[in-house]
Image (cartoon, coloured by chain):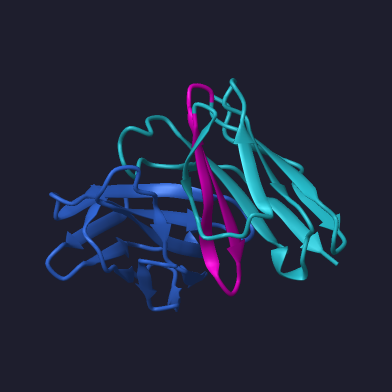
Chain colours: A blue, B cyan
Amino acid sequence: SQQGEEDPQALSIQEGENATMNCSYKTSINNLQWYRQNSGRGLVHLILIRSNEREKHSGRLRVTLDTSKKSSSLLITASRAADTASYFCATAPTGANSKLTFGKGITLSVRP
Amino acid sequence: KAGVTQTPRYLIKTRGQQVTLSCSPISGHRSVSWYQQTPGQGLQFLFEYFSETQRNKGNFPGRFSGRQFSNSRSEMNVSTLELGDSALYLCASSPDPGRAGDEQFFGPGTRLTVL
């Protein structure tokens, strides 16, 4: 079963605009990760934020984490057509031998 | 470093057959996880192997099995294939399984179609 739930399910924006994607989860976590998947390919790790962090940046990506609300957001600034992909949040629950649990993903379309 | 490789990339089987998929992790990575991805269910965890031992298992029937070899390469097997087994099977490796929820490095996947 999915722990993380992304919102919205699909997003269509114009090149140059910012894209904001949200993820909510249910249990305590060690960290939360965002991945990107281009059509029918493997996932690529984008960024990891630990439970004691509130915000993290990587290039045009900004991730926030609010553990009190059990939610995270991924912001892609100045989007490009090449950002068109599916984006997944994955949570690593606390506890020994915990495994990453992925949400169902957000489909982002960036129109040139 | 070479990335995670999976073979074959595409596979077509018929109901009732069995299939074996292979995954070679990034050199030095000792943990290998397998996922099934379908449009309806999304990404679902199958199992994780570390040092030839299954460390974690998802909620799949016993028809799904796996193993890991001493060189960390892993295989998964699905017996008595069903139409619903059609999916993209993804393998991922990570460097340090001692850290819960480590970053995972994914292979390109094997697209299995069951007719």
Q: Quadrant of residue B85?
A: bottom right
Q: Position of residue B92 (x, y in %)?
A: 52, 42
Q: Position of residue A79 (x, y in %)?
A: 40, 63
Q: Position of residue B58 (x, y in %)?
A: 50, 55
Q: Which residue is drawn at the image coordinates 86% and 67% (left, top)?
A: B115
Q: Which residue is drawn at the image coordinates 14% and 50% (left, top)?
A: A53
Can you see residue A43?
A: yes
Q: Which residue is drawn at the image coordinates 87% and 61% (left, top)?
A: B14
**Camera-side residue of B70 and A38:** B70
The stretch in magenta equals: B27-50
Can you see residue A81?
A: no
Magenta-colored stretch includes residue B33: yes
Count of labels shown?
0
**Camera-side residue of A91 and A45:** A91
Residue A40 versus residue B57 in the image, above or below? below
Residue B2 versus residue B86 in the image, above or below? above
Q: Quadrant of residue A15?
A: bottom left
Image side of residue B74 versus residue A65, left or right? right
